[in-house]
Image (spheres, helix red, strand yellow):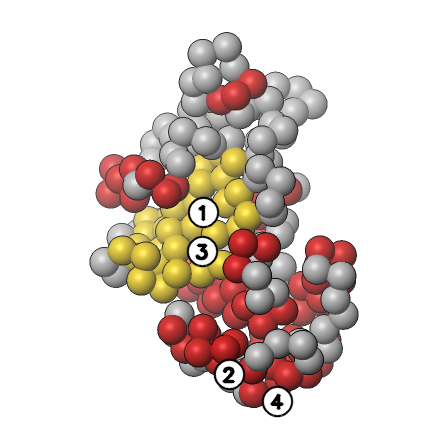
């Protein structure tokens, strides 16, 4: 599977990551347990989406005016720095990354040295880019696994929620949110009857996820 071909273009990807974050906020009120998150103003004109499965694997997506960069880390991959004697980054992962995008990874929160793959796309690019990395036969860099947790259909997202959060949200409501319908207090209540709807709305508003 070519993960680059299946990856959405940046504008659609950003919209989808915001939807994932919104639904995580509604369905999981414990912030530290959320799988998907989104920070609209992480830095000046830069938004950040994050996937964290709580088992040591993570994915950062930084949306900047100059382009988008994705950094992923699969802790079980043989490409992990921790699987190497000197804990060095696997050759080629950051090869060819434009300086303007690579500089975004230098923030401590991004943990740039914890990496098994990197994908990027400048505004002038017609497709996603990836460094020339020689992956040993039988091994993987984690990109298929982690990018596979960006769920492009409401059906796939609901299936994920059932498995990960042990909840069964309404597919109709999730599908409406995927299609761009603004979430309402009634929809929040139906998705998570145990939550404080006002608290959820306040958090969504603070992250600019209501529109």
Secondary-structure class at tag 3: strand
Secondary-structure class at tag 1: strand
Question: Mark 3 or mark 4: which comes first in sequence?
Answer: 3
Classify 10 Å Cα crowding around label 4: few (below 14), some (14-19), many (20 and above).
few
Q: Relative to residue 11, is residue 82 drawn left or right?
A: right
Q: Are marks 1 and 4 in contact (CB under 8 Å)?
A: no
Mark 4 or mark 2, whichever is nearer to me? 2
* Quadrant, the N terminus: top right
Q: Eyeballing the image, is 191 above or below 41?
A: below
Classify 10 Å Cα crowding around label 1: few (below 14), some (14-19), many (20 and above).
many
Q: How far apart are the alpha carbons under marks 3 and 4?
A: 26 Å
For disc 3, the marked residue is 49
Q: From where the camera sits, is residue 144 visible? A: no
* Quadrant, the C terminus: bottom left
Q: Which mark is residue 60?
A: 1
Question: Mark 4 or mark 2: which comes first in sequence?
Answer: 4
Q: Residue at x 63, y 29 (%)?
A: 76
Quadrant of res 136: top right
Q: How many marks?
A: 4
- Residue that extends furthest to the top in the rendered view of this protein: 85
Q: Which mark is residue 186?
A: 4
Secondary-structure class at tag 4: helix
For disc 2, the marked residue is 198
Residue 112, percent across and down? 38, 34
Secondary-structure class at tag 2: helix
Question: Mark 1 or mark 4: which comes first in sequence?
Answer: 1
Residue 51, percent across and down? 53, 51
Q: From where the camera sits, is residue 30 visible? A: yes
């Amino acid at each position: 599977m070519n993960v680059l071909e299946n990856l959405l273009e940046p504008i659609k990807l950003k919209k989808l990551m915001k939807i994932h974050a919104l639904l995580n906020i509604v369905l999981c009120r414990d912030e530290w347990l959320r799988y998907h998150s989104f920070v609209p103003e992480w830095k000046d004109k830069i938004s950040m989406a994050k996937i964290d499965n709580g088992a040591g694997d993570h994915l950062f997506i930084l949306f900047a005016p100059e382009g988008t960069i994705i950094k992923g880390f699969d802790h079980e991959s043989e490409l992990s720095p921790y699987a190497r004697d000197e804990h060095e980054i696997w050759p080629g992962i950051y090869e060819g990354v434009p300086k303007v995008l690579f500089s975004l990874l230098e923030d401590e929160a991004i943990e740039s040295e914890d990496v098994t793959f990197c994908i990027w796309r400048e505004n002038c690019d017609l497709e996603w880019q990836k460094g020339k990395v020689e992956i040993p036969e039988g091994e993987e860099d984690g990109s298929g696994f982690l990018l596979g947790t960006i769920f492009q259909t409401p059906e796939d997202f609901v299936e994920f929620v059932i498995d990960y959060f042990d909840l069964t949200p309404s597919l109709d409501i999730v599908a409406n949110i995927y299609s761009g319908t603004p979430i309402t207090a009634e929809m929040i209540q139906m998705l998570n009857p145990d939550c404080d709807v006002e608290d959820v709305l306040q958090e969504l508003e603070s992250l600019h996820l209501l529109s």
